[in-house]
Amino acid sequence: MRVLSGVQSNGKLHLGNYLGAMKQHIHLQRDNECFYFIANYHSLTTIQDATLLRQLTCDVALDYLAFGLDPDKANLFRQSDIPEVAELAWILSTVTGKGLLERATSYKDKIAKEIAPSMGLFCYPVLMAADILIYKSDVVPVGKDQTQHVEMAADMAGHFNHAFNCEVLKIPQIRLNQAHVVPGLDGQKMSKSYGNTINLFDPPKKVRKQIMGIKTDSTPVQDPKNPETCNVFAIYKLLATSDEVEQLEQAYRRGGLGYGEAKQQLFDVVERELGPARDKREQLEADPDYVEDVLTTAAHRARAVAGKVMAEVREVCGLLVGKETHRG
Ligand code: ADP
Ligand code: TRP
């Protein structure tokens, strides 16, 4: 199966990104042909600073590799190394009704957060559809917040095939990531834009401080506590083994467990998950040539696939490019 997903390079990745997206991406590399890209064209909708964008793009690559993405099994590349996606996005925009884009909840959310309503932001789902369709992807693993975009990509593929009376674009399937919504330090969805994150590669001291700051109620230490409504427990559940979860749950219900102690247990499981990746990331950071090599090798493979699909797309649209100018 060909699996495709993208992650924007628009800020430091956090536990929500890891549990909600990256972990599954890395797991899927075992039995599938995977294409994962760093969505730096998409990031331009919010980051307009060349040095920063370069840095954040490199950070995402380091993060994935540190968590075990194996470049021999999965293709990790920069979106902008496949400029054909911008061409396909244009073509798709000609078969996409404006009304479809106006219904995008993510656009409305971003406007509500006062991100400038540029054409790029409005057309974001069209570029995302091009990302998906240009590789004839079978499956797109994403978090709940992105499912509408993948449905739109399926609609656009259908509109294109119908308009040009062909079957060139493949209708993709959504694969919903497991940890649907990881709560942040304040109980809302963990998100860069809410300032409530546990970042993946902050120093342990900072991570501990953030965890100690998680909002809890004021039930006294000796009283029983409800794990279902506790934010510390909600994050713990996503990282601990089932035995550990059961033990902590009993300790909550029994009483005598302070929130400080529960937070310490959460910190321990967070560190168990993040610690080894932190060490690996430091090694990778010291070898930028290796990281660049991973990205360009994968881009080469991805571009070969994209190039073939684009040749079919141009053909059915009547856009054949003259021989001398043909891009390969
Ligand atoms: P952010 O909200 O921090 O800007 P993004 O929108 O860039 O995060 O999300 C990148 C990927 O991580 C998406 O696939 C998204 O579904 C996933 N993701 C982000 N935050 C969470 C969360 N709190 N819980 C689960 N998945 C998340
Ligand atoms: N929009 C996605 C996000 O913000 C990133 C993305 C861009 C993507 N293109 C994609 C995800 C194609 C899956 C498939 O998380």
Image (cartoon, rainbow, N blue to C red):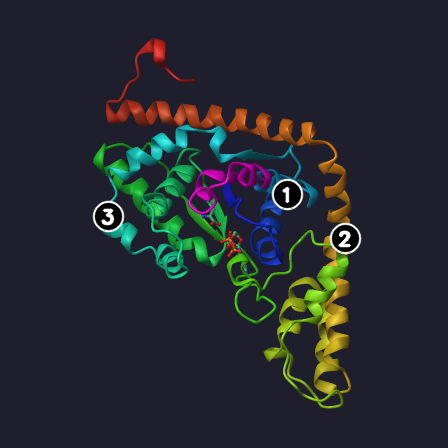
Amino acid carrying mark 3 in the image: Lys
* Cα separation between marks 3 and 1: 35 Å
Residue 18 appears left or right of 82: right
Q: Check mark 1 vs ligand 1: CB closer than 8 Å? yes or no.
A: no
Labels 3 and 1: the sequence-earlier one: 1
The percent coordinates of residue 29 (x first, y second) are 61, 41
* Cα separation between marks 2 and 1: 14 Å
The percent coordinates of residue 65 (x first, y second) are 67, 40
Residue 72 appears left or right of 126: right
Magenta-tinted stretch: 30-55
Mark 2 surroundings: few (<14), some (14-19) or many (≥20) residues within 10 A: some
**Which of the labelled discs sits on residue 172, or is there none?**
none
Identify the residue under disc 3: 98
Residue 206 appears left or right of 180: right
Is residue 272 inside the magenta stretch?
no
Q: Is residue 283 above or below residue 18?
A: above
Q: Write the residue at 68% across / 27% down.
A: 289
Q: Is residue 308 above or below residue 89?
A: above
SS label for mark 3: helix
Q: Mark 3–mark 1 contact, CB under 8 Å?
A: no
Amino acid carrying mark 2 in the image: Gly
Identify the residue under disc 1: 64
Amino acid carrying mark 1 in the image: Tyr
**Which of the labelled discs sits on residue 275, or is there none?**
2
Name the foreground residue: 223 vs 318: 223
The percent coordinates of residue 258 (x first, y second) are 75, 81
Residue 1 shows in the view: no
Q: Check mark 3 vs ligand 2: CB closer than 8 Å? yes or no.
A: no
Name the foreground residue: 178 vs 66: 66
Q: Write the residue at 32% across / 40% down.
A: 157
Labels 2 and 3: the sequence-earlier one: 3
The percent coordinates of residue 67 (x first, y second) are 68, 46
